[in-house]
Amino acid sequence: MPKTLHVAAAVVTNDQGNVLIARRPATVDQGGLWEFPGGKLAPYETARQALVRELHEEVGIEVVSATPLIRIHHQYPEKNVLLDIWSVDQFDGEAYGKEGQAVRWVSPDELSQYSFPEANKPILKALGLPDHYLVTGDADNEDDWLSKLQKALESGISLVQMRCHELDEAEFIARAEKALKLTREANARLLLNAEPGLLDKVGADGIHLTSERLSYYSQRPVPSDKLLSCACHNIAELNISAALQADMVTLSPVEPTASHPGVEALGWQKFSEMIEKLSVPAYALGGLGRADIRRARGLGGQGVAGIRAFWPQL
């Protein structure tokens, strides 16, 4: 079995919201490609210690604060790589290529214009996602539902999963059009918890597949310019989601929930173990709220998804 190379790297963001990238020297493996600055751990170093050292040695900045973003296992033909990716938005110094490498500050929207190693691709996905994710809940009627959605968007929600299983297809489409108008006005994105074919009728930003629908597909069922979210409860479903090239997954239930009484919760340790080798951003779901975001991210998750914590009570 190939040896695993453990690497710590950082998504460094400046006050203008731009991200620091560096070009790999032409003389090294995958030379000429762009990457997020960092390097391999020395013996007995933690990932954070390696990150601080590498950023000082490579680009001349001193880390003030860093939080985990995502952990990525990637298998190349000749080696396995474990990437510990951190988010750094507070640092001292001016970044420059101390080893003679080209460095550049680019906006997150421009990152897709640069060529990165294959192992870096999940980082690009994670960068485009928030640390909390709303799943819509119940309402007395459509006006009440739309009012709750509006209030959630005003609170800063930027990713919404429209979950309205009680509606027939025609009702769902009609409400989705109204929801899409609200999310567009708030610069937020809307996912439909529905059959992927509904994207032909509603110009939403993507689809969320239930665990039941997940089993229907052997290849990605939405275009690459749309988001694909998948509901997972076990390793098999996580593996299917990865094979479908999902942009994100929800993993649940992490804690006991009133909506699923009697269902055994995974707990945080199991959540961490299950996503350890998953190269897809994962949201913890089930009995969680804003106070759990930091813990989810610290364990390698993208953040937290939820209904009750983010769905307003009018």
Image: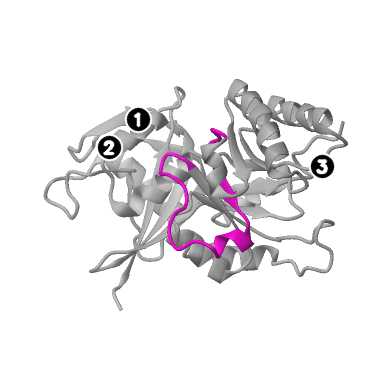
Residue visible at 73% across and 44% down in the picture: 168
Indicate the amino acid at tag 1: Glu
Residue with the most extreme left position = 27
The answer to whether marks 3 and 1 mark residues whose Cβ atoms lie closer than 8 Å is: no
Secondary structure under the numbered disc 2 in the rendered image: loop
| Residue 195 shows in this picture | yes
**What's the mark number on residue 138?**
3
Mark 1 packing: few (<14 Cα in 10 Å), some, or many (20+)? few
State the CA–CA distance, disc 2 to disc 1: 8 Å
Residue 20 point in image, percent of width and height: 35, 34
**Does 206 sit left or right of 259 as displayed?**
left
Please provide the residue range marked out in magenta.
202-226
Q: Nearer the viewer, residue 38 or 154?
A: 154
The correct choice, above or below, for 234 with respect to 244 in the image is below
Q: In the rendered structure, which disc, 2 or 3, sits on the residue that comes first in sequence?
A: 2
Front residue of this view, candidates 187 and 131: 187
| Residue 219 in which image quadrant | bottom left
In the image as oriented, which residue stretches furthest toward the front?
170
Amino acid under label 2?
Tyr
Q: Is residue 276 visible?
A: no
